[in-house]
Amino acid sequence: MAWGRKTKSEPHKQLILDLGTGTVKAIIVFVENDEVHIAGRAYVKYKPSLAHGGVITNLEGMALACNEAIKLASAQAKYQPKSVIFGVSGQLVESVTTTVHYDRAHPEQSLEPSELKNIIYKIQQRSSERLRSVLQEKFSDSHPDVELIHAAVVDVQLDGYPLENPIGFQGKRLTLTIFNAYVPLVYASMMQELARQLDLQLISIAAQPYGISKLLAAKDREDYNGIFVDVGHTSTDVVVVKSGSVEGMQSFAFGGQAFTRAIQRSLKTSPERAEKIKLEHGLGKLNKRSADKISEALMNDARTWLIGVELALKEFSDLKLLPPRVYLTGGSAPLPELRRVLLTKDWTQSLPFSNKPYPEVISPDDIDNAVDEVGLNWSPQDLPSLGLAKLLLDLTPANDIVTAMLQSIIRSMKGLG
């Protein structure tokens, strides 16, 4: 899905607000020549009391923090935004990947658009039913109403052969896999109210984990596979990508804050000092004696974090194989203890990895199709926001009729046309 548009004169700039834990990140970007250009960026910290578990608890206070971030980014970009895309925490996102095997009554006849449209509509209905079932298991009594924020075609096959566009082909069994992401309806309404208070038009709500999956997307690298693990402040998002498409995402409540607190306890120092030491340790700036002491303090928490990763991957029970490449992002991603525990063998025994997992930290230098217009310094903790910016790039071929039909059906189901 591309939200940006090109003009012959000044390209359209778009504001993205990444509502992270403790920090609002404002980025102003535009799309030009199949690249996303960063024209402005600003981070503003807010009081922990404004949000809890990714959910805003003080809308007026959050609006003030957002306004401050927007003001700083706008000054840098020399542009006053009129619309906004919100990035929301993976803790708020429920996702469902649905596969339907449809046996055609007349396989000798070419597949018509009307037949494909009917199948996609049935998949979307089944996805909603599956989500309701998941929520009923997760919430013993009442469960929240949800709103669809993203849908993508993962795979299309006809009689076992992958096809981008099955229209006009003959065959018996059509297999379609579609990924859907939802947020609670009450939170979607909250985002609409926040946009109103900011005097901005709400363009879209984007799942931060989905943006993470797009970090390595490029024209010459559309079929990459991997597990993206974003270590946030209080939570970790796990996203499985197959052939460049999201297979699913999970989130668990264990993030970089736990490692900061472990250092704070070990050294009996302030949270600010512990956070600084953690980042320096991740960048390899400590001497060996200090690094060994910090590593000892972090290993127990790293093993606990690994259990969370393992349990998250077990939720992808429909996948026959997991890709072995593990891409780490987020402020705590460079911690060597995370790679160390991921390289151990025991945790992989009950998971269907195709090969031994190999973790690597994504560097800003690894990101293609992104141009820094203002000479910013990028670090691993900036990458989730950069991933949201890359969602503006439309890397889907223009003749992708399956995706076009899916988006048309979604608009129809939402009553948007």
Image: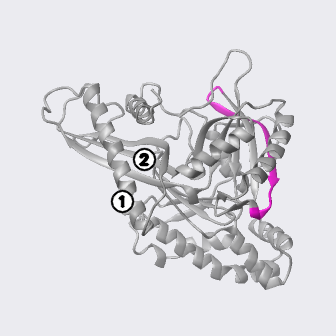
Q: CA distance from mark 1 to mark 2?
A: 16 Å
Query: Does residue 285 appear left or right of residue 340 in this picture?
Result: right
Disc 2 marks a residue whose amino acid type is Phe
Q: Residues within 10 Å of mark 1 (few under 14, many from 20)?
A: few
* Nearer to us in this view, 281 or 256: 256
Can residue 343 be spotted in the picture? Answer: no
Disc 1 marks a residue whose amino acid type is Ser
Asked which quadrant contains residue 320, the reply is bottom left
Q: Residues within 10 Å of mark 2 (few under 14, many from 20)?
A: many
Magenta part of the chain: 32-49
The numbered mark at residue 133 is 1
If the image is split into quadrants, where does the C terminus sit?
A: top left
User: Residue 135 placed where, x, y %?
Assistant: 42, 61
Whether 171 is among the magenta residues is no
User: Residue 355 placed where, x, y %?
Assistant: 43, 64
User: Residue 272 placed where, x, y %?
Assistant: 85, 70
Query: Does residue 362 appear left or right of residue 114 in this picture?
Result: right
Q: What residue is pinned by disc 2?
A: 179
